[in-house]
Image (spheres, rainbow, N blue to C red):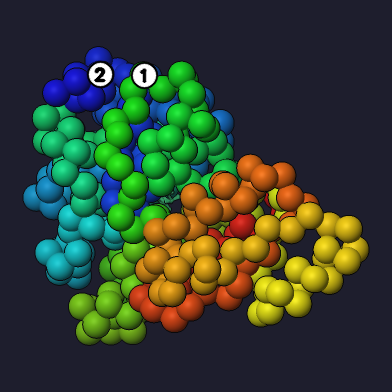
Amino acid sequence: MEAARILRAGGVVALPTETVYGLGADALDAHAVARVFAIKGRPEHHPLIVHLARADLLPGWAIDVPDAAWTLAERFWPGPLTLLLRRGPLASDQVTGGLATIAVRVPDHTLVLAVLDALGSGVAAPSANRFGRVSPTTAAHVVADLGTDVDAVLDGGACRVGVESTIIDLSSPDPRTWAVLRPGGVDTNQLSEALGRDIPIALGGPKKAPGQLASHYAPRARLEVVVDLDQRAAALEAAGRRVVRLGPDQLGATAEAWARSLYGAIREADGQGPDVILVASPPAGALRDAVHDRLRRAATPA
Ligand code: TXA
Ligand code: MG
């Protein structure tokens, strides 16, 4: 398979996953991983998620894997859940940002699973956008962002989930410290239910990872989340501002639909060159926390 061949040769390939497109390199190839940082424009101490073909490949990448991790892997992999565990001997400083932990997941997309299987290694992949920009959910988004800087873009269609994976930190032996570091494609309630304990969302706490920046996923235009779209739009337009509105008419009726269309809609809105992108409060549903988190970050100026 061509994508696996390119990765084996030290290349960088944009890969479809169920969440967002990733910018992948063989996690054991230091030169290839360095290119990922360079292409993304990502600061070098920001750790990457390692993608594996199957849960049974975890040993080596992670050590002291708690039973809870196996429980979650069994229930949610392949799927939009990233486990933060103590790093094993295969995990380089480059991939982990020099931290004592490693982030790993098994993505749920037939194309990327076939590539991982053929490569027989882990693929380190951040989202395939330029640093600080909205994540890509189609191959066309990747090409618009990264152009010919990547060796190949594997087109797997539009991403099914549309926001990044949930990151749960299980790296401490003390279960009372376990927490969600980034809400995402797996709802926090489902994690609490699977583990039989309440898993808090540790937002804005001590910065465990440099990647958890307040401002991220930022469009060029100012983005505001508002309760009354029409009222706010009228006020801004009266003041001569150009406004694009994103609400249920554009994004759908459920949080899941919003997650799926959010990044594409923000890109499109931004492309119209408005002064302000106005977004309504997201509707209820399993992915509401994730959508809300991304909107909050997109609304924070860089
Ligand atoms: O859905 C996803 O997770 C997508 C697809 C491509 O898999 N990937 C993704 O990667 O969102 P990225 O690099 O855009 O975001 C990964 C996040 C960053 O905030 C990073 O700081 C955090 O995971 N992370 C990675 N390794 C970590 C570690 N060892 N400790 C704490 N946070 C870590
Ligand atoms: Mg990202």
Residue 147 image position (x, y, % from top left): 48, 24
Is the shortest distance between ligand 1 and the CB of mark 1 under 8 Å?
A: no
> Which residue is painted at 28% across and 75% down in the image?
191
> Which residue is painted at 57% across and 69% down in the image?
247
Disc 2 to disc 1, how far (Cα)? 8 Å
In-front residue for pair 257/104:
257
Residue beneath disc 1: 151
Residue 192 image position (x, y, % from top left): 29, 80
**Which SS class for mark 2?**
helix
> Which residue is painted at 36% across and 19% down in the image?
151
Residue contact at pointers 2 and 1, CB within 8 angstroms: yes
Q: Is residue 40 above or below residue 78?
A: above
Quarter occupied by residue 201: bottom left
Q: Tell me the kind of residue under disc 1.
A: Asp
Q: Is residue 200 above or below residue 269?
A: below
Quarter holding the N terminus is top left
Residue 65 image position (x, y, % from top left): 19, 59
**Which SS class for mark 1?**
loop
Residue 13 image position (x, y, % from top left): 33, 27
Q: Locate residue 156 relative to residue 270 in the image: left or right.
A: left
In-front residue for pair 167/5:
5
The numbered mark at residue 244 is none
Q: Is residue 110 above or below residue 296?
A: above
Residue beneath disc 2: 6
Q: Tell me the kind of residue under disc 2.
A: Ile
Q: Locate residue 27 relative to residue 202 in the image: left or right.
A: left
The image shows a total of numbered marks equal to 2
Quarter occupied by residue 119: top left
Quarter occupied by residue 116: top left
Residue 84 appears in the picture as rendered = no
Q: Residues within 10 Å of mark 1 (few under 14, many from 20)?
A: some
